[in-house]
Each structure stands twice: as C-alpha cells, then as structure tokens.
Amino acid sequence: MNKILVPTDFSDNAFNALSYAVSLANHFDSQVTLLHTYTVSSTSGMFVSVESFVKKDAAEQALAAVKQVEPKLKTGRQIDTQILRGDTTHLIAELADKQEYDLIVMGTQGATGLAEIFLGSITNSVIKEAQTPVLAIPEGFTYQPITQIVFAVDDEGIAHAGVIKPLLQLAKRMQAPVRVFHQALDFDQDGIDPSIDLYLEEVEHSFHYELDREEINASINSFVKDTHASLLCMLRRPRGFLEEVFHVSATTKEVFDSPVPLLVLKDG
C-alpha cells in the first residue's frame, strides 16, 4: 500500500479521513496525497481572477491541513497536495486509477454516517467510478488499530486474487483475523463460495453464517459490534452495490450505518 489518495473539501469529516490515512500510512510507509477539486463558473469576464483566488485559497487551506497532521507521520515522508479544477468524482477516480494509487480514503457526511454513501454522495459516486479501492470513514470516527476485520460476502465467488489484495495487506500488517460473514435468505442458497476460502488462505480467517430473510444491514452491524471489529469490508459487483449484492430493497439501504470504516473492493 504505497500510495494513498485523500480527497478533501476541507470539512471536519474530510480532515478526519486525512488523520486516519496518516495513521494508516505509518503502518505501510505510504505516500499520502491530499487532493482538492474545484469548479469556477465562467459567466463573467472575471473568470481568470476568480479562479486564481479560488485556487490560492484552496492551496492555503490544504497547506494548513497538512501542517496539522504531517508531524504525526512516523515515516519521514511528506504529504503532497494537488489542487485540480473539474468534476470532483471524475478527477478523483481518474487520478487514483491512472497514477496507480492503492487506496482512496474519504470521509462521509450526514447524521446517518455511512448511510450517506448510498444516498448520492461524492463518496458513493467515487466508489462506482473508480477501480481503486475506497475506504469510507464514518463521521467522527477516530483511528484505532485494526484488530478484527469483518468481510461481509454474498454467495458469489471472487474473480481473482487481486480483488482482495488490500484486505490481505491490512490483515497481514495489522495481524488482524478476517471474520467472513454471510447471511442467507433461505436454506436453498449455496452459501460462501469456495474461492473466498482459497484467496484468504494467507491470513487467519473464519466463517460465520446467519439465516434471515430481512434486516441484513442490522445483522452485519450486529456482527461487527459483537466481534469488536474495527473495519468492515465488502465487494462491489458490476450490477450494483448493497441493494443487489445482498438482495435487499432500496429502502433497506437507507438504514445502513456501519459504526466502523468501510473498505469497498471492486470485483469486475
């Protein structure tokens, strides 16, 4: 995990994500990049001067944020910053994918915490567009060592080992066991695909099943709390995210409020 990208809008949630990324970087000797994007309307002849002001102001805020967290870096690295004009989602995804970042760390907003990522937020848009894994940090969550990881899966397999590489890296470096959680809707489902056991063989892992036709979000959260996990990991399939991967309704997704960071890996 050599390169970590942290998009920011200079909000408290974004700064919280930056602080988390710095703590993570200390474990991997990672280079951290703080990215801010902006747009400027070109409706007047003042466009050039307005853009110059916006960019200068953003650079100053970025520098202030870096000065607050850089002393916490134990690796001796410096946090670099990028200020880019354009569509936020596209720029984040493009920069992360083309410059081969290993992880995007983003804060979420709203009183419902991680439920925000399912309600049209920038974080959700980045999860959909970027190939790079995304780590979504709940509002107000303070970094804590990753000692247990919950990997919530459906009944499909994993395309190849590279899909869960970030999960394996975290589990190995933190010496954190992976608790694979699967909720079946009925007895006729196939359960956990054998490929998951195969690709997790490098780390300590165990399997946990639950039979319930509804309330999968509540079941996941309950399992996270029961195992004292500090990270939840899920896969994003091409056909959609939680509502289709776990066969839950569009209304159910609104109550998804994981109390811990959510690592989203893309499969396909």
Image: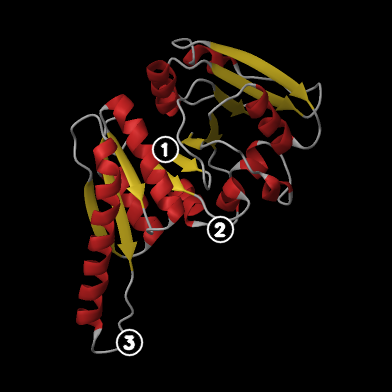
Q: For mark 1, what is the residue?
A: 133
Q: How many marks?
A: 3
- Residue 236 at x, y = what percent? 53, 38
**Residue 162 visible to the viewer:** no
x, y percent for residue 196: 54, 18
Mark 3 closeness class: few <14, some 14–19, many ≥20 residues within 10 Å: few
Helix, strand or loop under label 2: loop
- Name the residue: 53% across, 34% down: 235
User: Mark 2 and 3 residues: CB-CB less than 8 Å, in contact?
Assistant: no
Q: Nearer the viewer, residue 138 or 99?
A: 138
Q: Where is residue 3 shown, x and y percent of the image?
A: 27, 36
Residue furthest toward the bottom?
A: 45
- The image quarter in which residue 209 lies: top right
- Find the distance from the CA under tag 3 to the CA under tag 1: 37 Å
User: In the displayed structure, does residue 158 sit left or right of residue 202?
Assistant: right
- Check the picture and name the quadrant holding the N terminus: top left
Up-down relation of residue 164 to residue 5 (above or below): above
Mark 2 residue type: Gly
Q: Earlier in the sequence, mark 2 or mark 3?
A: 3
Query: Which sits in the foreground, 121 or 57?
Result: 57
Q: Distance from label 1 to label 2 (Cα)?
A: 18 Å
Question: Which label number is shown at residue 120?
Answer: 2
How crowded pointer 2 is (Cα within 10 Å; few <14, some 14-19, many 20+) is rated as few
Sequence-wise first label, 3 or 1: 3
In the image, 142: left or right of 183?
left
Q: Would you place residue 118 above or below residue 184 in this image?
A: below
Residue with the mark numbered 3: 43
Q: Is residue 212 left or right of residue 25?
A: right
